[in-house]
Image (spheres, rainbow, N blue to C red):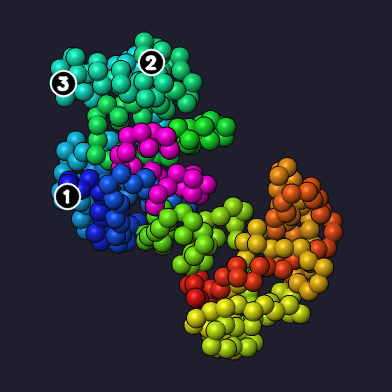
Amino acid sequence: MEDTGVHLRGVTKDFGAVQVIRGVDIDIERGQFAVFVGPSGCGKSTLLRMIAGLEETSGGKIIISDRDVTDFDPADRGVAMVFQSYALYPHLSVFENMAFSLRLAKRPKAEVKDKVVEAAQILQLTDHLDKKPSQLSGGQRQRVAIGRAIVRDPDVFLFDEPLSNLDAELRVAMRLELARLHQKLGATMIYVTHDQVEAMTLADVIFVLQGGYVQQSGAPLDLYDDPSNRFVAGFIGSPSMNFFNATVEDRTDTGIRARLEGQPDVAFDVDLTAPPDPGATVVLGMRPEHLVVTEGEGMRVTVDVAEELGGVSYQHGTLDGGDPVIFQQTGARHNMHGTVQTVTPQTDRIFAFTPEGDRIR
Ligand SMILES: Nc1ncnc2c1ncn2[C@@H]1O[C@H](COP(=O)(O)OP(=O)(O)O)[C@@H](O)[C@H]1O
Ligand SMILES: [Mg+2]
């Protein structure tokens, strides 16, 4: 069977003296929904544009469907790209916008019609084919942009932040539509976003980009449960993981006891297979949803802001030593604003990192 996956080998990109992509290996299997996620400016769009052939590759190889396409023209790569700015032709109808690339390729009239009508059905645009883009809502325009990709029947769909111009509600609705579209088409899709929630909800496989490298790749929950470093730990999950400096005071073969720098009357046991020596500084990571309010010992948090969302609330505060803390409360309504709470982490949910940000396992 033909492999329509996408494989990057040692890919780099220089803009003048600046290396934006520093050596990236990526494997996306046929039919996967892959998401490149990372903060603004980390090179997500550049990488996607290199896969599309819109940006030259400085080093390394790009393989699509078993062909080395590194030096191919965009049109010969079997990819179709959907941009954040829908880039529709304002003077053309929805039908003609979707038909544009097929007309350009001089496809027979009947085929053009069949393909556009079929794409319109998939995207629920059938009633809008005669309209101009200006007569459509933002969500419908984005669907037309996706339709233009679908009619080309590409091996790989490339999406660059396609939902960021939509308001919050529509973004969630379109996210679901994209998930359904992927199920329906079964095509390989690569989706770029800075929004880790979009990444978590859409992806079969996430690639977290930062500093020109893939920091970690894997299934969404694998990244959440088992981040390789502090960057990924802080980037995946909302609200972000809390981090506290601590000093190792005791070590056994199976773990450490580490005392918080910001609140020296509090120490936690952390199970580790490679525990650092006593005296070492470590960074302990604890997610807001794994901090539990207790009556007994724990971290004292002075809560200064309570965000109540209904089903859950986020209590923001500081430790005695001044470190910021967020913890989550679920179920009953909790407004702990102005109170001092004692919280303690679920013991099997404490992560440890070196001061440089590497995970200690
Ligand atoms: N044509 C270009 N010339 C010079 N620098 C560029 C060019 N395109 C992008 N960059 C730089 O490359 C970095 C990555 O950009 P980009 O891929 O757009 O990031 P992202 O999509 O992750 O926000 C940024 O620092 C950006 O300024
Ligand atoms: Mg971008």
Q: Quadrant of residue 346?
A: bottom right
Q: Is mark 2 within 8 Å of ligand 2?
A: no
Left or right: where 3 falls relative to 351: left
Q: CA distance from mark 1 to mark 3?
A: 26 Å
Q: Quadrant of residue 242?
A: bottom right
Left or right: where 36 falls relative to 348: left
Q: Nearer the viewer, residue 76 or 211?
A: 76
Q: Amino acid at mark 1?
A: Asp
Q: Residue furthest right?
A: 339
**Start and end of the magenta stretch?**
179-205
Residue 271 image point, x, y percent: 57, 78
Q: Secondary structure at mark 1?
A: loop
- N-terminal-most mark, 2 or 3: 3
Residue 194 appears in the figure: no
Residue for point 30% across, 39% down: 187
Q: Quadrant of residue 287?
A: bottom right
Q: Which residue has dot 3 on it? A: 107
Q: Amino acid at mark 3?
A: Arg
Q: Secondary structure at mark 3?
A: loop
Q: Which residue has dot 1 on it? A: 66
Q: Which residue has dot 2 on it? A: 126
Q: How many other residues sit within 10 Å of disc 1, few (<14), some (14-19) or many (≥20)?
A: few
Residue for point 21% across, 38% down: 78
Is residue 201 covered in magenta? yes
